[in-house]
Image (cartoon, coloured by chain):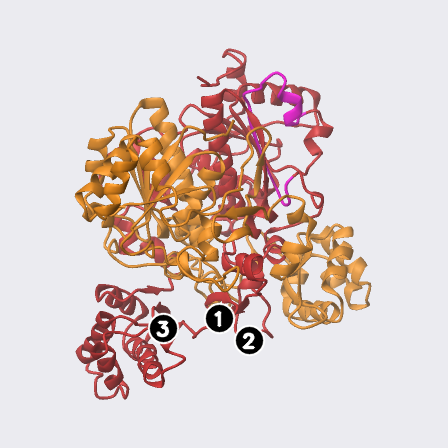
Amino acid sequence: MRALSGIRICDFSGQLAGAGATRFLAAMGAEVIRIEDPVTEGYWDALRGVSPFVDERRGNDFGGPFNNHNVEKLGVTLNLRTERGRQLLRELVAVSDCVTENFAAGVLARLGFPYEELRTIKPDIVYVSNSGFGHAGPYRDFKTWGPIVQACCGLAFSTALAGELPAGIGYSYMDHQGGNLMAIAILAGLVHRNRTGEGQWIDMSCTDGGALLTGPALLDYTVNGRPLRRPGSPDSNRSESPVMAPHGIYPAAGDDNWIAIACRDDRDWRCLAGVVATDWAREPRWRTLPGRIDAMGELERLLAEWTGVRDRFDTAAALRAAGVPAAAVQRPSERIEDDPGTTEWGLWPTVTHTKMGVVRVDGLPLHFSKTDWVVERGAPCLGEHNDRVFGELLGHTDDELRRFREEGAL
Amino acid sequence: MSRAGAEAAGPLDGVRVVELASEHAAFAGKVLADLGAEVIVVEAPDGHATRWFEPFADDVPGAENSLWWWFYNAGKSSVAIDLDDASGVSRFRALVASSDVVLEGEAPGHLADRGLDYGDFEPVRPDLVWVSVTPFGRANPRAHEPATDLTVAANAGPAWSCGYDDHALPPVRPGGNQAYHTVCLWAVMGAMAALYARDTLGIGQHVDVSMHAASNVTTEAATYEWLVAHATVERQTFRHAAVRRTPDRIITAADGRHAIGALPRLTAEFRALADWLVELGLRDEFDEYFFLELGVERGGILLNEVDRDPLVAAIYRAGYDALRAVAAHLTAKEFFVGAQRRGLPAGVLMAPEDVIEDEHFVARGFPVEVHHDDRNRSFVYPGAPYHAPAAPWRVRGRAPHVGEHTAAVLDALGTESPRRSRAQ
């Protein structure tokens, strides 16, 4: 029994912004059938062939990122340049609940399958498109990938130290969150269809999604007229909403080692000062938030001198034992191999990929008490499930499948 | 695209969510409210602590003035209940009994100690969906550690990947309460999948959501470089953390603002860039123009040849320099639009205030006016991430005052059936 059993998704989405959405649905039990182009060998999704690799083998079935993002999905090929390919897609749409894609705006329509056509094939189909700027608006035809989305939505600008260039976000955050928002859109469309029998086209814009996440900083502008772009701002290691001090990432003993400390209130400060236990920490001027804010530079310098000669894990543990939020900045190896907060959660499951073998991948950050997620099967090799989908599901015979291949449709 | 559906009901119309006010789960409740659920936030009679989070409207501190509260509680109702009081506890039980979903971010064990946890309601409401959003998740050996957005970002991976080439500068927390926003979208996904299962299978359940785990699986290559190849990424100024150093990306335009552009590889991209230099009258002063022409003549370049072939490297370098030469004569916004119109992928670093006034976002209807009847004014809020005409995501109204709906909600409990479930 799976939470999303019975849902079938005809899935063109890839990279991470799209693949992440259907990854969640597949792990929850939906049947996700990923459709790829045999002519370009699936390389529309460049992640099929890029590093990291498990060994010396290369090619479109060996990309580590593709395996990570497409676990638990089925994979088929369809050449939509051929009439046979288009016919097979119509057959698949007719037995699907949802069509998903994150092509540039308009691409699926140019392939012959705009929403109007999908709706003709299956009147209650839920069609979810996810592009950088959406299908409406002056930037609809602009090309994007994660860093462009993050630049144009306000999030990359918001990530910086005072007086420095924007640092940006060092990963495609809006591919992750775009995928999450797309998953919400898909479920919203399916819930609405179940209640009303009505399908629809949901047009998602990843930059709209990113702008949503600027939250209170945006209201500070629209309500108070205070822009985030002002002297000394942004400074994202500080906390302005709510105001906390000290609040930052400070050096620790060793090479490129750091510790984060968040002093939420005056009580946290008393506890922190008790752990630091130096003359400067006992000074009365630090006891209230205004005092700590007024001389923040000096306070942070003193604190950094103290943390800088100490082990980051020991310091963090001592501060947490006193009730103060503190944590080492962990390297990937530390948070993946040595952190019971992830390992005992089961956050790094292993999957079996037909060619790559056994590989560890991302798990899910939530557990369901009755219908939990399953991540066991690796990503599909190109066209791995053609026989299963076009044969067993759609009912075509072996002879027909052979002919489809000869025609170049698969 | 038609905006006619803007007044249609949301996909979660008719679903009642009882949310215990918290910093952890507030954004999840906001999204559920935008999706049309009736979200009732339960707070103490003197208001929840997050009502005192900065900034404040007109910079006047007050329980009804926090813009943090406004954003994260838009469209919800507020019921004030004292859970330290026996009659308050019985009112809370009745409220939960009337709901489809409970959303909370309480410290693990806190509700169980009071007999108010999922396990206390499950026997009488087996169809209830209960979503917990906590720093580490309940089923976690670290469940009781204190944590904030910053410490999770530091501990769970994001900060390791954000910052500058100069590693004397500390790693940077990604802006905008990222750790909370990440976990809260997962909480919404969990709530919706659980509601779907309730409607189709007739079962409710507990969904245990971990902020630490959510950030851990939201750092892209940092994680799978280690999982697959035992390689470690390093932070780099305004680009992806990577195992190897990549060319710097950020471009400073004539107005001092910043942009990014993809380095040209294709014939058409070299052609467009060369033509753009000519248009701007920069052909003669750009020493490497010849190499752009060569990029066109050669039919583009392959990135894997840059390290092997000095000529390809020179063409690649010319593309890099040409983007900067163009940007030095334009505003960052002009560079972005001009590049995109020529087929060159590019972005401009917008601040939130730039986004909300930008013509594209305005044309899509992203900024929305939310009326505050208590102030007789409307304010602009960020709107929906997608257009869904038949079942829209829509900000449903302003955030509630402390206990604004206490009487209306609790009085109605006595008159309606205790179970409003739509389970089929």
Nearer-the-camera pick, B288 or A207: B288
Mark closest to the chain's N terminus, 3 or 2:
2
Instruction: Check if mark 3 and mark 2 are on a common chain.
Output: yes
Residues at circles 1 and 3 in contact by the CB criterion of under 8 Å: no
Q: In this view, does B276 lie above or below B21?
A: below
Sort mark 3 into few (<14), some (14-19) or many (20+) by Cα contacts within 10 Å. few
Q: SS class of the residue under badge 2?
A: loop
Q: In this view, does B316 lie above or below A293?
A: below
Q: Name the residue under label 1.
A: B237
Nearer-the-camera pick, A201 or A100: A100
Question: CA separation, marks 1 and 3?
Answer: 21 Å
Q: Is residue B345 visible?
A: yes
Looking at the rendered structure, the kind of residue marked 3 is Leu
Q: Mark 3 points at which residue?
A: B303
Instruction: Specify the colour of chain B.
Output: red
Question: CA separation, marks 1 and 2?
Answer: 8 Å
Q: SS class of the residue under badge 3?
A: helix
Q: Position of residue A161 (x, y in %)?
A: 53, 67
Q: In this view, does A297 lie to the left or right of A28?
A: right
Sort mark 2 into few (<14), some (14-19) or many (20+) by Cα contacts within 10 Å. few
Nearer-the-camera pick, A314 or B318: B318
Q: Name the residue under label 2.
A: B166
Let me know if residue B118 is in the magenta part. yes
Could you tell me how many numbered marks the image carries? 3
Q: In this view, does A272 lie above or below A8?
A: below
Colour orange, chain: A
In which image quadrant can residue B232 be found? Answer: bottom right
Q: Where is residue A313 in the image (x, y as percent from the top left)?
A: 73, 60
Instruction: Check if mark 1 and mark 2 are on a common chain.
Output: yes
Looking at the rendered structure, the kind of residue marked 2 is Asp
Question: CA separation, marks 3 and 2?
Answer: 26 Å
Question: Magenta span covers which residues?
Answer: B116-137
